[in-house]
Image (tube, rainbow, N blue to C red):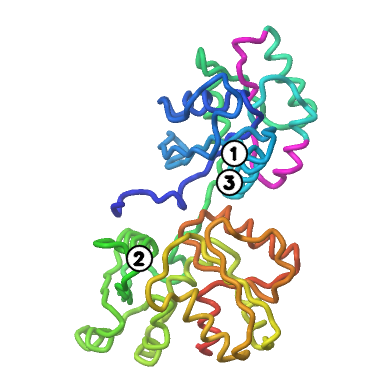
């Protein structure tokens, strides 16, 4: 991925949801203008969420995702439905696809997806004689925007795009360095290039910080933690801001000039993706942990850890130094985030650079609703090191 590519986590996520054979896959192909999803009259053709990155005029970079039919049955069918429900956590807008005015079904999903922007696509309108009347009935019963669509003759596709534009949140994610870097600042980035970094590439937080700072016409100086002291000596003035990788925080902090502000990539992502105030408040729970406490450490992405991974090794070490060696720590990755968080005294989440804001906030709200404190890597390490 180049610096000009828009990562999936920063795109608008639009998801099609509906029963089997309601025409979701055909509608996806019609919206994106190409054969992205497999279309078949056989029920259950779509088995896993299928996403297509696309640019839509007015909406900008998007990911439109087709999902398995939510009326699927059997053991395998239930797994498909579960994956659909997991995928919906990241949806900024849901397109509920129906092929008739099934108002009971629509109301059920309106309740399940409450809080999300929704539009109803009354699909296969080319096979209906009274599509407009059915659309009015759906709107009267649900007050949801309803568009009659047909993937065969293209009816309603432009109108559906217009509705998506109306429903699109105007500010999906705040700028990464908002409130930290101003135009023309001198900014130093501390970027350890460890074995887990992609070969020949910078990790996503580093890429996004560099791109945003360049757009602010900032002067950027980058180095690894070991070169911080020598790099500072080569500068004519102290940096206005220093952004460090969390795992280098202990090494970096003593060398930071008093004139410079200091933060971490993870803290910046905590504010961009999640609820920074809740994370700060929740971090104080670490002061009262005991060996009998239970901690959940959650990573947004699945990866094979190499060396002293921050989530699997370094944070657990700091926690046990504070609370005791027998502290109970459970680590999950990717979609393996438990529905029931009540067994845990604290959740510590990664920076979620691979999640969109909607998906991360869904996890935050899940923790809040179960009265479980949640913080993130950067905030947790800062608190544990008393920085």
- Image quadrant assignment for residue 252: bottom left
Q: Which of marks 3 and 2 is nearer the N terminus?
A: 3
Q: Is residue 18 positioned above or below 276 on the image?
A: above
Would residue 387 be found to the left or right of residue 295 on screen? left
For disc 1, the marked residue is 167
Q: Which of marks 2 and 1 is nearer the N terminus?
A: 1
Distance Cα–Cα, label 3 vs label 2: 26 Å
Q: Is residue 201 positioned above or below 9 on the image?
A: below
- The magenta region covers 108-128
Q: Nearer the viewer, mark 2 or mark 1?
A: 2
Q: Is residue 119 magenta?
A: yes
For disc 2, the marked residue is 206
Assign a secondary structure to mark 1. Answer: helix
Q: Nearer the viewer, mark 3 or mark 2?
A: 3
* x 51%, y 83%: residue: 382
**Numbered badge on residue 87:** 3
Would residue 253 be found to the left or right of residue 127 on screen? left
């Amino acid at each position: 991925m180049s610096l000009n590519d828009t990562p999936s986590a920063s795109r608008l996520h639009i998801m099609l949801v509906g029963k089997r054979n309601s025409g979701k896959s055909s509608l996806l192909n019609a919206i994106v203008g190409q054969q992205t999803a497999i279309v078949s009259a056989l029920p259950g053709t779509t088995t896993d969420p299928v996403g297509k990155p696309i640019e839509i005029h007015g909406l900008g970079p998007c990911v439109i995702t087709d999902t398995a039919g939510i009326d699927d049955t059997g053991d395998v069918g239930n797994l498909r439905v579960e994956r659909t429900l997991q995928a919906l956590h990241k949806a900024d807008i849901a397109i509920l696809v129906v092929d008739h005015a099934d108002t009971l079904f629509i109301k059920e999903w309106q309740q399940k997806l409450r809080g999300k922007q929704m539009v109803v696509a009354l699909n296969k309108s080319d096979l209906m004689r009274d599509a407009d009347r059915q659309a009015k009935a759906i709107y009267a019963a649900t007050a949801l925007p309803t568009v009659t669509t047909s993937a065969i003759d293209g009816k309603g596709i432009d109108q559906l795009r217009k509705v998506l534009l109306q429903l699109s949140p105007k500010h999906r994610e705040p700028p990464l360095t908002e409130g930290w870097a101003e135009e023309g600042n001198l900014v130093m980035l501390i970027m350890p290039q460890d074995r887990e970094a992609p070969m020949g590439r910078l990790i996503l937080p580093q890429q996004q910080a560099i791109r945003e700072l360049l757009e602010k016409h900032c002067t950027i100086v980058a180095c690894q933690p070991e070169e911080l002291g020598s790099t500072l000596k080569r500068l004519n003035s102290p940096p206005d801001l220093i952004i460090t990788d969390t795992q280098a925080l202990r090494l970096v902090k003593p060398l930071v000039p008093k004139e410079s502000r200091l933060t971490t990539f993870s803290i910046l992502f905590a504010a961009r993706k999640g609820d920074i105030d809740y994370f700060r408040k929740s971090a104080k729970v670490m002061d009262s942990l005991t060996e009998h406490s239970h901690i959940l450490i959650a990573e947004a992405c699945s990866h094979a850890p190499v060396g002293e991974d921050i989530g699997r090794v370094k944070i657990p070490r700091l926690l046990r130094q504070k609370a005791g060696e027998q502290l109970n720590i459970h680590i999950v990755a990717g979609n393996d985030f438990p529905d029931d968080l009540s067994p845990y005294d604290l959740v510590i989440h990664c920076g979620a650079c691979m999640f969109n804001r909607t998906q991360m906030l869904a996890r935050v709200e899940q923790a809040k609703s179960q009265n479980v404190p949640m913080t993130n890597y950067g905030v947790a390490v800062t608190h544990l090191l008393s920085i």
